[in-house]
Amino acid sequence: MPRSYENRSATRLLLADVDGTLVNDEKILTEAARSAVNDLRQAGIAFAISSSRPPRGLRMLIEPLALQLPLAALNGGVIVNPDLSVVDCHRIGLPAARRTVDLLRDHGLDVWLYTESEWLVLDPDGPHVATEAWILQFDPAVVAGFADPQLARAVKIVGVSEDPDLVAECERVARDTLGETASVARSNASLLDVTNPRANKGVVVLTLAKLLGLGTSQIATIGDMPNDVMMFAESGLSIAMGNASDAVQSNADHVTTSDQDDGFAHAVRHFILPQSV
């Protein structure tokens, strides 16, 4: 349910998820979305993105949106400048990375591994690899196995399956097994992301607040997946996309239209700009 606006600070930063939020199902950044970001700047509201994508997978958004603030990639595991130089990096750590890979494979999920600059897969023909390469606009490196030097550099490990129920069950088991040694959340129904405990979208809100000298009540967030709920909880105003699940929507102050109906632009016009003055 929406929280009361009483004593809520005016929004000074909008932090947006990318896939299913800022871009539509075809991964297109619509003219309405571009215009909405420009309208935010005209109103004195900063704009930043937080995504499960790796840094290289965000390159195509930087110029069209004239992004100036640091970008949070890999669920906040890597913070980069708009030129993709690394500001901060939170690796999973070797022991937790080993346990994560074993747990995911034991449950029958394919495994991907992201470092701050690489995407490694075991099976190039595995589920969703081709789709992910199309989205990110670069191909993974194929390896026979994940050696300790690679595991030690892991920023995000992903369990992949075409069975959403299996992914959901593995999420529960991974949280119980990994405990406080990792952050575990689905970035979509087929992908289970495991990162450092300090690498989640809630921490991204706190990081940007400190960087910009803002209170978290001055930050609004918008997203569509379970990993976005973490940033909803830390922000002053939260908006779920119309394509989000009921569970995600129930954790937001407002629900906008879907990503196929310019829900991002609708949210800016109806929920952000009217309360910014």
Image (tube, grey):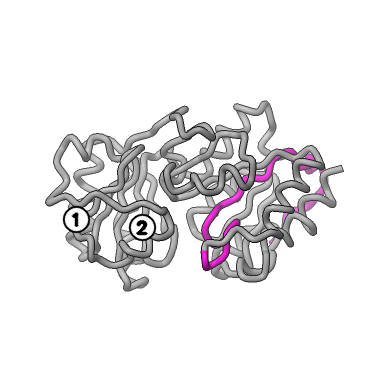
Q: Residues within 10 Å of mark 1 (few under 14, many from 20)?
A: some
Label 1 element class: loop
Position above or below: 208 against 200: above
- In magenta segment, residue 16: yes
| Alpha carbon separation for disc pair 2 and 1 | 14 Å
Q: Position of residue 135 (x, y in %)?
A: 43, 58
Three-letter code for the amino acid on which mark 2 is drawn: Ala
Give the left or right position of residue 173, taking residue 78 as reference: left
Occupied quadrant, residue 199: top left
Most distant residue in the right direction: 277
Occupied quadrant, residue 167: bottom left
Three-letter code for the amino acid on which mark 1 is drawn: Leu
Q: Over which residues does the magenta segment extend?
A: 1-26
Residue placed at 67% from the left, 64% from the top?
Answer: 263
Q: Quadrant of the C terminus?
A: top right
Tag in front: 2 or 1:
2
Tell me the chief SS of the magenta region.
loop
Q: Position of residue 6 (x, y in %)?
A: 82, 47
Residue placed at 41% from the left, 67% from the top?
Answer: 189
